[in-house]
Image: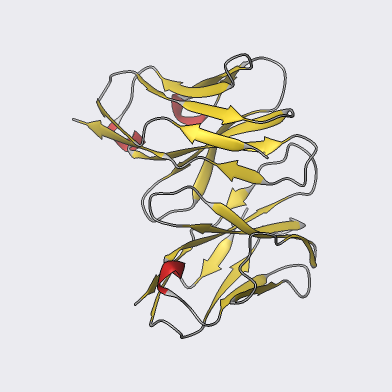
Amino acid sequence: EAGVAQSPRYKIIEKRQSVAFWCNPISGHATLYWYQQILGQGPKLLIQFQNNGVVDDSQLPKDRFSAERLKGVDSTLKIQPAKLEDSAVYLCASSVWTLQETQYFGPGTRLLVL
Amino acid sequence: AQSVTQLDSQVPVFEEAPVELRCNYSSSVSVYLFWYVQYPNQGLQLLLKYLSGSTLVKGINGFEAEFNKSQTSFHLRKPSVHISDTAEYFCAVERSGSARQLTFGSGTQLTVLP
């Protein structure tokens, strides 16, 4: 079974530029999550999708971050404009929408904002 | 809201020695508990989870954890570590019956020394 795919793996941009990350979840997984992991910290949930609808985006900085999952499969997370403090690893995870099912994580995209 | 405290940010241990990584949580409702491992430049991988039933949970790679409700703890143990166990370990909680959202601790870097 293929795992969660993410691209790119690494990205370096200057502040005020825009950047986009892509995630393809495990086939059949209805729930998709984006996490931000700052160096030295645990992952923090940014947004959660159920199929193509948003379940929770309460911790997403909506003035600069946006995310979509148009067809209920793959998803894109965008930052525009980027700030220095956005430097982090952005993790995508997916799961089956039933209780007690595990979240499976992708390898992440490491973003450095200069 | 839930919170997770991992009491040790770094744990060095010699190969073949036992190890315990500590995790305490705070929640006013029932929770599910997880341990994830993150190898360098990789995503998170589930080690084990506690949902209900026996408080001693066995996971992959010889790890086990014990749920202690009275002490609100979920410590991870391994009787004999290997060099390959060197990684970051994250404890996480999920409010039972919730929208499947994980709250992570800040992580413990386990370094196994030869």
Does the rendering let one see residue A114? yes
Q: Quadrant of the C terminus of chain B?
A: top left
Using the image, determine if residue A35 lies above or below residue B57: below
Q: Residue at x 62, y 76 (%)?
A: A63
Q: Relative to the observer, which residue lies in front, B85 or B1?
A: B1
User: What color scheme is it?
Assistant: secondary structure
x%, y% of residue B84? 32, 37
Q: Is residue A63 left or right of residue A7?
A: right
Numbered-mark total: 0
Q: Quadrant of the N terminus of chain B?
A: top right
x%, y% of residue B96? 75, 34
x%, y% of residue A79? 55, 77
Q: Residue at x 63, y 15 (%)?
A: B55
Q: Relative to the observer, which residue lies in front, B96 or A72?
A: B96
Could you say which quadrant of the image residue B48 lies in?
Answer: top right
Q: Is residue B17 left or right of residue A26?
A: left
Does the rendering let one see residue A111? no
Q: Relative to the observer, which residue lies in front, B86 or B98?
A: B98
Q: Relative to the observer, which residue lies in front, A85 or B90?
A: A85
Q: Is residue A39 left or right of residue B64?
A: left
Using the image, determine if residue A1 lies above or below residue A20: above
Could you say which quadrant of the image residue B108 lies in?
Answer: top left
Residue found at the far bottom of this picture:
A17
Using the image, determine if residue A102 lies above or below residue A70: above
Q: Residue at x 45, y 29 (%)?
A: B61
Q: Residue at x 66, y 42 (%)?
A: A102
x%, y% of residue B7? 41, 30
Could you say which quadrant of the image residue B57 lies in?
Answer: top right
